[in-house]
Structures are given as structure tokens and as C-alpha cells.
Amino acid sequence: MRVLLHTGKGGVGKTTMALTTAFGAALHGHRVFVLSTDAAHSLGDALGCSLGNEPAQAAAGVTVQELSVLDELDDAWSVIQSWLEAFLRGERKQANGGEGDEYEMVAEELLAFPGLEELIALRAIRRVEAAGEHDVCVVDCAPTGATLRLLRFPDVLHFFMENVFEWKRRTMRVVRPIAKRVHADRFLPSDEVFEAIQRLYEDVADVRQILLDGDRTSARLVVNPARVVVDETRRSFAYLSLYGVATDAVLVNRVLPDAAAAGYFARWKERERQEMQAIARSFPVPRFELPLKAGEPIGPEALTALSRELFGDADPADFFSRSRPIRLRKDEAATVLEIDLPGVPESEVRVVPAGHDLVVQVRDAQRLVSLPDSVSGRELLRSELRDGVLEVSFAP
């Protein structure tokens, strides 16, 4: 199944571009599923209808869904939530000598941590693929910061499972009999809770493989020709590369028409021209441009027409470029790890060895890169940013 992640700064028109891509792909005969992971859903607004948490048919070949965190919470977290409720009731009973209050709402709030929407989205992508009923999954991602959490979460969970989870589980098996004797075992998570976490990890690990599979997944960056938007999108391109997700196209939305070059918008059009040049320099992938419309394109018919204008005869589900953002190459006897980081100044990049791994930080994003056995443990000779590519060389 082809997976297309649409992201960008809030307000640039991500939802419209995601739906435009979906309706364009449907025109080429694909069965498309559009999934919104943005907490402030707007698929229904762009389609001119009301959507619930269940998948709905938007048009022939296009299914859409706005994920509700609370509705999905019971399925994804019921075991963990039940344990947390019991823990809270036990604390209250111990403090007041009574049965305690209802803590279901408190447990829900504690479990609805930042990034939960993205976590549930990861599981939903896996569910769409497992159903086998769609060829393309178009993801209307949350704005850049939340998308970064979506990409970061599998790495964070992997680190927790590899370094903390099994140790804690073994410790609980030793501590639980002792806690039971002093009637404190209710405060400890049961094996069922650990098994729920294990299932969650396996689900997320499966989706991680989907996101990092360059043969089916790529990102589309939506940008407006404005300085602040271009700067943030440039960083997003680098963040996606850092986490191993290739960007195959940039969608430039709301470009002022040539008629705006005269009169009131003349200076704005000139600034926009400069930003369009910056976009061409910053993103080494194909660009698709859409002019600013006199009115909002609402509904399947308008969005289908928009797709024809944006992509022409091209199939939006195709790969418009292919790349491997993270790769290894030989340089004589040394081995070089390369990471594409176009548009990033060297002052914002930091590389630190961490045992058998490598910590790479790009401004606000940090990733623990697991090194293959062929490189793990070798001396780091140098790290250098050259022509938008971070090169990290390891000794023979």
C-alpha cells in the first residue's frame, strides 16, 4: 500500500492538498483512504459535510476518517487505563479510608499525553493496510511539531523496550509476592499490563517499517511562498530526512496570480517571487504549484478539479522522486554514514557517539541512530555538513 504523509506549518492548506491528492489518485483508478491525524480535524470542513470517527465514503474510490482520540482510547489503552484507575482509587482509599471517587476521567486525562494522537494514527495506518481494501493511504498530518512527534515516537518506544521494559518486568515478578504480603500489590502493574505494552510496541514497530520503507512511503511538504513558512518547511524537510522518511515532492499552495504584480499587491508579489526562488533552491525535489483561488474549494467536485490543475496528467500516487535519506558508503578503507539535511546550517547540527549508536541533533530534533554491526564501535573520524549532506566517517 502506498503511504503519503502530508505535513507543513499550520494554516498552509495541508488538508486541502491531502484531499486534492486523494481525489487525483482516485481519478487514476486507485482505492484511496484518507486519514486525518490532526487534533483539529478539518476533512469534513473541506468536504462540506460532517464526519465521525468511523470511515465514510467521500466519493467513488475515496474513503475518509477523522480519528477521535477518546473513541480510540478504549481499544488501544483499555488494559493500561483500567490499571491506572485502580491505582488512583487505591491511593484515594488509603488516604481517606473510604472507597474513593470515580477516577475514569482522571485516568483518561493522564493517558491523553502529548503525542497520543500521533500514536493512534500509527496504529490506524497499520489497520488500513491490514484490511487490504485500499491501494493508497493519504495521511493529513498534524502541523510540523506534532508530525515530528509521530516520527520520533517509534524510536523512543524502541529505546524504552530495549533498555527499560524487560528489566522492569523481571523486577515486578520479584517484587510482586513481597508487595502482596503487605497488601500493596494493587500499586504494581500486572502481567496483563505489560502484555498490553508489548502488543503496543509490536504494532508501532510494524508501522515503523511502513514509514521507513522507501518503496511505499514518502512525505509531501505543503508550503506557502512566505518567509516564515519556507523557513519552517526547510527544517521539516531536514527532520523527515533525519528520521529516515524521504520527501518526494513539495506542494506550493496559494501562489498569487500574475495579475497581482500591479497595484496594491505589487510589493507582496515581489516578495513572493523571492520566496519562490528560495523554495527552488531549498528543496531538491519536484514542485507542484497551485495559484490562490478567489474562493475556497469545498466538496469532492471542487477538489477533483483542483487535483487536475495541480498534478495535470500525473498520477499523484506515483513517486515523483526517490531517495534514501540515510545511507552508508565506502570511502577507501573508511565507512561514511550520510544523512540528507538540505538547507540546514552546520551550526545547527551536532553529532555525538553514544556507545554502539550515534546521537544526531538538528536544532529541535534529536535522533539516536542505530549503527550496523559493520560500523558499531568504530572510532568516529569526522563529521561534516557538505552540500546539504551530513557525512560521518568511521575508522577502518
Image (cartoon, helix red, strand yellow):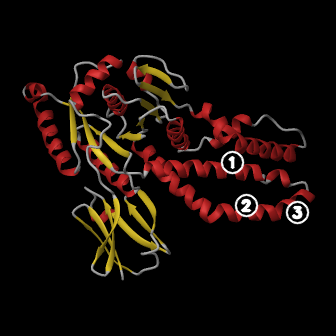
Query: What kind of residue is marked 2?
Result: Arg
Query: What kind of residue is marked 1?
Result: Ala
* Distance of label 1 from label 3 (alpha carbons): 24 Å
Which label is found at residue 266?
Answer: none
* Left or right side of 13 for 71: right
* Left or right side of 38 for 272: left
What residue did someone put label 3 on? Answer: 178
Residue at image position (54%, 44%) is 119
Residue at image position (46%, 35%) is 38
Instruction: Name the quadrant containing residue 222.
Output: top left
Q: Nearer the viewer, residue 92 or 201?
A: 201
Residue at image position (62%, 48%) is 200
* Distance of label 2 from label 3 (alpha carbons): 15 Å
Task: In the rendered view, tell whether residue 201 sits above or below residue 385.
Answer: above
What residue did someone put label 1 on? Answer: 196
What residue did someone put label 2 on? Answer: 169
Residue at image position (36%, 46%) is 218
Around disc 2, counting alpha carbons within 10 Å, would you say few (fewer than 14), some (14 to 19), or many (20 or more)? some
